[in-house]
Image: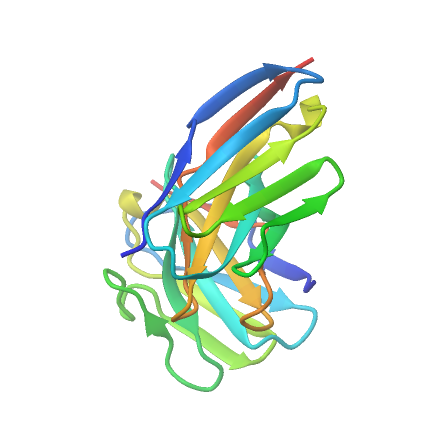
Amino acid sequence: KQEVTQIPAALSVPEGENLVLNCSFTDSAIYNLQWFRQDPGKGLTSLLLIQSSQREQTSGRLNASLDKSSGRSTLYIAASQPGDSATYLCAVRLNTGNQFYFGTGTSLTVIP
Amino acid sequence: SAVISQKPSRDICQRGTSLTIQCQVDSQVTMMFWYRQQPGQSLTLIATANQGSEATYESGFVIDKFPISRPNLTFSTLTVSNMSPEDSSIYLCSVGRGIDYGYTFGSGTRLTVV
């Protein structure tokens, strides 16, 4: 069974700092990986989708990388802002089935 | 990407009652899913809602407790039956257009059972 781990569980940084969130998964036979953000008590907002054949994806201040062979993905946030404060979740989809396996998330607080 | 309207956004329910959650999508989608997020936990897939046939449930979830309907390609409901405080969670609807695309999530239903 796919296990997805996110480290750290919580992170607090001053505004303007660049930061990296980590996601690791045990089964490298993934089809794609998706990063989401979740605001307290809310649903999920998709940030970036990386196919297994891709190494990275960028959207604005966000950059996600994927190293399938080592079972790792990172989400890089540049010039963090208080509005970036949220929980960030990564989810992987295997080559078989439709299910996404979610990590436990990293709770980010950006201090003004 | 698809726009999802999920209702209700939150509810407080009495033990032993049932709540039906609706998920309406602005376009036809191939795949629809229902997830649960218990307090402090990540998301767990409850079932895949199949259009015109019975839903496919994940291990630990059963139809009697979580009946699901999907009458067409834009709408689905999840009912949480005979609720207990352990059912207090956020329930989320998710849709996908195909295997090469990511999934879109609804805004969630925050359920509290008292």
User: Is B107 placed above or below A93 here?
Assistant: above
State the residue in front, B23 or A86: A86
Picture mark count? 0
Left or right relative to B58: residue B48: right
Provide residue B68's location: percent of width, then percent of height: 41, 71
Residues A26 and A106: in front is: A26
> Which residue occupies the foreground of this view, B29 or B65?
B29
Q: Residue furthest bottom?
A: B52
Residue drawn 26% across the image and 67% down it: B62
Is B11 situated above or below A85? Answer: below
* Image quarter (top left, top right, bottom left or bottom right) of the N terminus of chain B: bottom right
On the question of residue B34 being in view, the answer is yes
- Colour mapping used in the image: rainbow
Q: Position of residue A12 (x, y in %)?
A: 54, 17
**In this picture, residue A52 sits left or right of residue B37:** right
- Residue A94 lies left or right of residue B59; in this view the side is right
Q: Quadrant of residue B73?
A: bottom right
Camera sees residue A40: no
Residue at 28 percent of width and 58 percent of height:
B82
